[in-house]
Image (tube, rainbow, N blue to C red):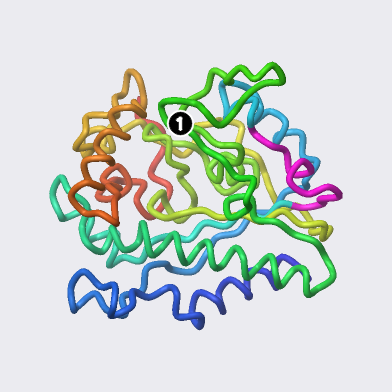
Amino acid sequence: METTEIRTFIEVFRNGSGWNRVSPEKALRTDLAGMEMFSPALLGTAGADDPAFLLLKNEGAVGPQFLLPREWLPGARSVVSFFLPFTARVREANGESGPEPAPEWLHGRIEGQDFIDRLSRALVERLREEGADAVSPAVDSRFASCTLRNTAFLDEAGTPFPVTFTSNWSERHVAFVCGLGTFGLSRGLITSLGVAGRFGSVITTLPLAPDNIIPDELYGNCTLCGECAAKCPAGAISLEKGKDHILCSKYLDLMKEKHSPRYGCGKCQTGVPCEKEIPGPHKR
């Protein structure tokens, strides 16, 4: 199985599984029934032994709790990261809905993540059918994350690592290593198809040809225009300090209280120059 076949598998699943569309039973409005959430995917492939993965264990990146590809899957040879951009309908609705997330975005955030989880599991099974082993960390039972209070990641002495708002596998950082883009002021990853979308990944023993070119600059695709800061209803983003995860998290909690079982925001990803593409050169 080659990377092109994986791309085809993802596209067939996106178009034909039915999970990329809002079901009538879950639609928040009748006109949202059948709405497509994601456009075609962007893929990047890296070798499982790429030294850039080791750098993600640094405190300035993901943190010491980050598990390397071969810690997830002994014998791993390749990591495939994919980005699924939201459709224009989802993006535009959220850009025009004021300070709260549009119903279209709420579906994309929750039902959309369910689609990605199902896609990830299906891709793992397909790779196994091809004779390789595979794992998708985000849907693996070993996946763990923490927000403000870390109770998930302990050192050998049982002391919590000094980390917050992190996990043992970061889709954004893995996508960076796989060459899909660079970070923005909002800490989203700006790909060639923009920042508004969601990521997934698989690790496999299949020896795929790496195609990743790791950017020289962490924020190379960001113009620092400040539009994401201006759009943030929580005031959680600034040119001086970047993103305040605590303020962002508190606002998401408010949205969950109001829209439960759904939640989301995405205002820093929509109605901004990097929404669907890489914006112009730096404006410092």
Q: Is residue 187 left or right of residue 263?
A: right
| Helix, strand or loop status at disc 1 | loop
Q: Residue at x 15, y 45 (%)?
A: 99
Q: Residue at x 49, y 52 (%)?
A: 192
Residue 194, image x, y percentages: 42, 51
Query: Looking at the image, which is closer to me, 43 or 165?
Result: 165
Residue identified by numbered label 1: 165
Query: Looking at the image, which is closer to me, 236 or 252?
Result: 252
- All told, the count of numbered labels is 1
Please determine whether, in this image, residue 282 is positioned above or below residue 278: above
Residue 29, image x, y percentages: 18, 73
Residue 249 on the magenta span: no
Q: Main secondary structure of the magenta part?
A: loop
Residue 175, image x, y percentages: 58, 46
What is the span of residues highlighted in magenta in the rendered image? 66-78
**Quadrant where the N terminus is found in the figure:** bottom right
Is disc 1 surrounded by few (<14), some (14 to 19) or many (20+) residues within 10 Å?
some
Q: Residue at x 31, y 63 (%)?
A: 107
Residue 219, image x, y percentages: 48, 32
Q: Quadrant of residue 170?
A: top right
**Quadrant where the C terminus is found in the figure:** top left
Residue that sits furthest to the left in the current view: 98
**Identity, as a three-letter code, of the amino acid under mark 1:** Phe
Q: Is residue 111 left or right of residue 56?
A: left
Q: Residue at x 57, y 20 (%)?
A: 160
Residue 72 on the magenta span: yes
Query: Looking at the image, which is closer to me, 201 or 84?
Result: 201
Q: Is residue 162 left or right of residue 270?
A: right
